[in-house]
């Protein structure tokens, strides 16, 4: 494998502009899959780079400066860390400035070295990001020997020759650079003076000048390499705004090659409507001012690219303007998110204002903070008047303490309740409130939606009154019918005694049976008339069964209740259901000695079970027992039980086995059961 990798690197050296997988495969007589594997291996190890041109992928050797050359050529303070942030190298400038020896720090993890105090926690975190390719630059100030010195501290992603990741930290001493420039000018002046005074020193001065010039050239090349590998877009324009330099990041962002960028005017990459502002910014640069701003660029494919531009003027030694230096960060994704958030905000505002419900937001002091048009219409206030309203001005029942309790409890997800609102004109209206807690700008508030239910409340009251009248009428009518049936049954009894003819006796018996059937049906209507009349309530199962047992004659039968603090949402006649289930076990179970009541969870539902150890119910009767009129007694008990349970969506079925006992299972949905506060559920 090493031999093949060397062959691929050799052919990539010959073709610095890059080769495709097919070209490498063809030139080295390798199959395409093998060539692709080796090329990707070189990219992963950092020895090669990949660039996509359309659908084609070009591979070329990475152009990185060897670590030893970097340390020997750089005048900055340089520290090299491996992927675990262990110190691997430091140049002499670094060691001297921080007064440490290489033996003291090399091989130590930066966080546990004597240098740790110079780095913040955030910078340690960003060092790890730099290992993943995200370089950073920081301003760094240090007090030393009574003087303040300024640095640019740069985190630069690196790759060792073996392919492992590393990070370089460069301290660019700006103060020393200025001093060096001044010293250099003084030295040149001294050399010129000496040249006039002593002609014999001319050759020596020329050689010194060449040495300094070469050093500066090498330093420039070093800085250029750093700029080329920076993760931020960097370009330089001349006084005519023509591009004179652009690093790889700029070409990557805009989609142009360096040849296509160099020499073109910066305005060529902008949209026409942005040109005027661009020229204004360049004028600011000519005046010697730096600034940071957002700019929209046009990529080669015509698409929009947003950049955060940090631009500074470039001047020569005489202070003349020579162009502008710009660092650019691609913020296209951020701008897109900002645009989407703005659109969503407008959408939600439209929903708020077009809602027919009176939507409003109040703070912990009850002050009205936000509202929609429907809220103003609901109460009859203007927007100016609403700005000074407090909840006590319109709600006759909700107190300020209740508002604070709901906010401070941190448990308000969504609550519904009814209250009464006082309008500006003095009228009252019943409303249904849906409220939840929200946090706006760090402040807890109550978001509420009010719906006028005055007409519904009037209708409910009317229905209640009508039901009351109907109930009274049916009660009187039933009483009169029962009185007449009693008289009829008495007359039938007299006829049975006076008529001895068997022919008439059979007819009289049938009449008596009909009268009894009518009697039982009338009694049933007395029980059933109250089903659903009152709204359902939360009932604790254990308490309901205990109430039933207090009036039922269970004899020696053992009743086991294992329902904990289970509560169900059911009609007020739920106790009648439990009574019928227990009575059926006592009446029809024949050999029942124990009745067991329990529950179990099945997914989001709860199954409440009543079971006994009697004779059980035959398979053909398991469904028929719930039909009206079936059974040996009245025939209405289980029919009535199913109807009462159905009011709140509870279903019931019989699942016992013949010979082992009856088992009635009631399935309760998640919205119709809960557990009391003392429960451990």
Image (cartoon, rainbow, N blue to C red):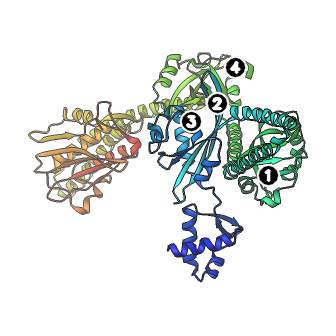
- Label 3 sits on residue: 96
Mark 1 or mark 2, earlier in chain: 1
Q: Are marks 2 and 4 in contact (CB under 8 Å)?
A: no
Mark 3 or mark 1, earlier in chain: 3
Q: Secondary structure at mark 2?
A: strand
Q: Are marks 4 and 3 in contact (CB under 8 Å)?
A: no
- Label 1 sits on residue: 245
Of badges 2 and 4, the one in the foreground is 4
Q: CA distance from mark 2 to mark 4?
A: 15 Å
Location of residue 182 in the rendering, given as x and y in whole percent from the top left corner: 77, 32
Mark 4 or mark 1, earlier in chain: 1
Q: Are marks 1 and 2 in contact (CB under 8 Å)?
A: no
Location of residue 437 in the rendering, given as x and y in whole percent from the top left corner: 53, 30
Q: CA distance from mark 4 to mark 3?
A: 66 Å
Residue with the most extreme bottom position: 29
For this view, does 645 lie left or right of residue 4? Answer: left
Q: Identify which residue, 11 or 518, lies in the foreground.
A: 11
Mark 4 or mark 3, earlier in chain: 3
């Amino acid at each position: 494998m090493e031999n093949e990798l060397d062959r691929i690197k050799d052919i990539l050296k010959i073709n610095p502009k890059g080769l495709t997988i097919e070209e490498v495969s063809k030139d080295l007589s390798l199959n395409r899959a093998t060539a692709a594997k080796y090329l990707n291996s070189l990219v992963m190890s950092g020895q090669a780079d990949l660039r996509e041109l359309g659908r084609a992928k070009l591979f070329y050797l990475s152009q990185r400066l060897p670590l030893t050359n970097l340390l020997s050529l750089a005048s900055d303070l340089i520290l090299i860390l491996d992927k675990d942030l262990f110190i691997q190298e430091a140049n002499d400038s670094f060691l001297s400035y921080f007064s440490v020896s290489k033996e003291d720090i090399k091989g130590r993890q930066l966080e546990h070295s004597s240098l740790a105090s110079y780095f913040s926690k955030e910078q340690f975190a960003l060092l790890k990001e730099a290992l993943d390719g995200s370089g950073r630059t920081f301003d760094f100030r240090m007090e030393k020997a009574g003087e303040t010195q300024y640095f640019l501290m740069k985190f630069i992603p690196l790759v060792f020759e073996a392919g492992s990741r590393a990070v370089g930290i460069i301290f660019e001493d700006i103060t020393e650079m200025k001093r060096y420039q001044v010293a250099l000018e003084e030295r040149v002046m001294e050399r010129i003076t000496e040249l006039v005074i002593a002609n014999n020193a001319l050759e020596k001065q020329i050689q010194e000048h060449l040495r300094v010039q070469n050093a500066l050239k090498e330093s420039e090349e070093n800085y250029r390499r750093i700029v080329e590998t920076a993760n931020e877009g960097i370009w330089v324009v001349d006084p005519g705004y023509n591009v004179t330099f652009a690093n790889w990041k700029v070409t990557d962002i805009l989609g142009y090659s360096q040849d296509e960028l160099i020499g073109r005017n910066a305005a060529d990459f902008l949209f026409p409507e942005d040109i005027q502002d661009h020229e204004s910014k360049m004028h600011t640069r000519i005046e010697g001012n730096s600034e940071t701003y957002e700019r929209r660029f046009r990529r080669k494919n015509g698409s929009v690219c947003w950049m955060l531009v940090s631009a500074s003027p470039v001047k020569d030694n005489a202070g003349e303007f020579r162009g502008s230096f710009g660092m650019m960060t691609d913020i296209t994704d951020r701008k897109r998110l900002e645009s989407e958030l703005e659109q969503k905000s407008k959408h939600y505002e439209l929903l708020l204002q077009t809602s027919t419900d009176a939507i409003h937001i109040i703070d912990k002091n009850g002050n009205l903070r936000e509202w929609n048009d429907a809220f103003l219409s609901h109460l009859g206030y203007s927007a100016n008047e609403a700005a000074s309203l407090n909840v006590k001005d319109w709600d006759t029942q909700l107190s300020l303490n209740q508002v604070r309790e709901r906010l401070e409890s941190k448990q308000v997800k969504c609550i519904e309740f009814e209250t009464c609102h006082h309008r500006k004109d003095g009228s009252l209206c019943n409303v249904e409130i849906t409220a939840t807690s929200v946090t706006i700008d760090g402040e807890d508030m109550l978001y509420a939606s009010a719906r006028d239910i005055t007409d519904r409340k009037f209708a409910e009251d009317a229905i209640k009154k009508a039901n009351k009248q109907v109930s009274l009428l049916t009660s009187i009518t039933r009483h009169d019918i029962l009185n007449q049936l009693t008289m009829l049954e008495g007359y039938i009894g007299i006829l049975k005694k006076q008529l001895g003819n068997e022919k008439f006796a059979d007819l009289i018996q049938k009449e008596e049976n009909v009268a009894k059937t009518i009697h039982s049906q009338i009694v049933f209507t007395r029980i059933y008339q109250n089903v659903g009349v009152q709204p359902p309530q939360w009932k604790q199962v254990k308490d309901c069964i205990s109430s039933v047992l207090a009036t039922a004659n269970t004899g020696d039968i053992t009743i086991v209740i294992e329902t904990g603090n289970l509560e169900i949402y059911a009609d007020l006649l739920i106790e009648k259901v439990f009574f019928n289930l227990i009575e059926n076990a006592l009446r029809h179970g024949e050999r029942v000695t124990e009745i067991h009541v329990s529950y179990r969870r099945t997914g989001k539902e709860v199954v409440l079970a009543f079971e006994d150890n009697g004779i059980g119910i035959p398979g053909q009767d398991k469904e028929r027992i719930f039909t009206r009129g079936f059974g040996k007694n009245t025939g209405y008990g289980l029919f009535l039980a199913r109807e009462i349970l159905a009011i709140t969506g509870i279903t019931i079925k019989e699942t016992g086995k013949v010979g082992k006992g009856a088992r009635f299972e009631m399935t309760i949905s998640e919205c119709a059961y809960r557990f009391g506060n003392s429960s451990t559920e």
